[in-house]
Image: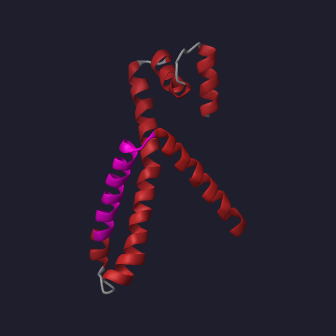
Amino acid sequence: LLALLGFMAIAAGVKVTNGQLAIPQLFEDMFPDWFAGVAFAAIGIGALVPAAIMSIAAASLFTRNIYKDFIKPDATAEQETKVSKLVSLLVKIGALVFVLTMDKTVAINFQLLGGIWILQTFPAL
């Protein structure tokens, strides 16, 4: 779908210096302001959903495998929920600080390494 929007931007003659801005510029040039706002909001939400899922997964892993097993084995479900919410918030804050202070080349290297590590798990499956 994004590739088709890219071709649409080329066909519409959208001129940008950075290719990553072609689709947002297409929305801004071709559609009414209200639709562009909805489209930008959808792009933002699409970026936030995977981050939220990853932070919840990290919090759940910490709560079940570290907090419950080593720190407080007799923790109630309510205590686990509180710890999980706190850890999720800390993971989100840590990720935000990490992203805002990181050099772009380091971010690209982490992305490449993540892909390599995931590809290495396929033979095990």
Q: Is residue 79 above or below residue 12?
A: below
The front one of 34 and 21 is 21
Quadrant placement of the N terminus? top right
Q: Residue at 44% across / 49% down in the picture?
A: 49
Rendering colour mode: secondary structure
Give the overall secondary structure of the magenta segment.
helix
**Vertical placement of 68 versus 44: above or below?**
below
Any part of residue 109 in sight: yes
User: Quarter of the image holding residue 47?
Assistant: top left
The answer to if 71 sits in the magenta stretch is: no
Q: Quadrant of residue 90?
A: bottom left
Compared across the picture, whether 46 is left or right of 86 comes to right
Q: Position of residue 6 (x, y in %)?
A: 61, 26
Where 50 falls versus 7 (above or below)? below
Residue farthest along the right direction in this orientation: 123
Could you tell me which residue is drawn at 53 percent across and 50 percent down?
110
Where residue 119 appears, x then y in whole percent?
Answer: 66, 57
Which residue does the image show at 56% across and 25% down from the upper left? Answer: 19
* Residue furthest top in the image: 13
The percent position of residue 91, horizontal first and vertical second, equals: 36, 58
* Quadrant in which the C terminus is drawn: bottom right
Look at the image and say whether residue 98 sits in the magenta stretch. yes
Q: Position of residue 113 (x, y in %)?
A: 58, 53
Number of marks: 0
Residue ID at (36%, 80%): 68
- Tell me if I can see residue 125 in this picture: no
- In the image shown, does 96 or 4 lie closer to the viewer? 96
Residue placed most toward the observer, 67 or 101: 101
Q: Residue furthest bottom?
A: 74
Give the residues drawn in magenta, as a range. Answer: 83-103
Left or right side of 73 for 31? right
